[in-house]
Image: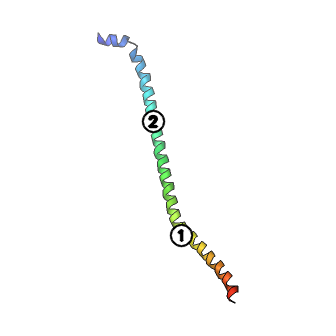
Amino acid sequence: MSGEAFADSPLPSSFPSIAVHSSTLATKLDETNYSLWVLKFYLISVLINFSVMSTTLFPVHQNSINMVQQKSSISHQTPAST
């Protein structure tokens, strides 16, 4: 008896569409969550690479600036000392 009343009600026909919609929404949320994790990983890797490059390249750049300044000061001092 209760099975017949349940079969006659309009609710079971609406349940599959709600289930499909919720599973589609869950899939979209999973894809969005995955995209956010990929974006976070990419940004963290870029920051790590930038920090490594800045620590390795900046002293070299600073040394080259110091060498250029020393050469220019030596070249300016040489005619004055002779």
**Tag 2: residue type?**
Leu
Q: Could you tell me if the residues under marks 2 and 1 are in contact, i.e. CB atoms within 8 Å? A: no
* Front: mark 2 or 1: 1
Which callout, 2 or 1, points at the residue further toward the start of the chain? 2
In this view of the protein, which residue sits in the foreground, 57 or 77?
A: 77
Q: x, y (%) of residue 45?
A: 49, 54
User: In which image quadrant can residue 17 be found?
Assistant: top left
> For the residues marked 2 and 1, what is the alpha-carbon distance in whole angstroms?
45 Å
In the displayed structure, 73 sits above or below 57; it is below
Q: Residue at x 48, y 47 (%)?
A: 38
SS class of the residue under badge 1? helix
Q: Which mark is residue 7?
A: none
**Tag 1: residue type?**
Pro
In the displayed structure, 43 sits above or below 68; it is above
In this view of the protein, which residue sits in the foreground, 13 or 26?
A: 26
In this view of the protein, which residue sits in the foreground, 42 or 63?
A: 63
- Which residue in the protein does label 1 denote? 59
Q: x, y (%) of residue 40?
A: 47, 48
User: In which image quadrant can residue 58 be found?
Assistant: bottom right
Q: x, y (%) of residue 74?
A: 64, 82
- Which residue in the protein does label 2 denote? 29
Q: Residue at x 41, y 25 (%)?
A: 19
Q: x, y (%) of residue 33?
A: 45, 40
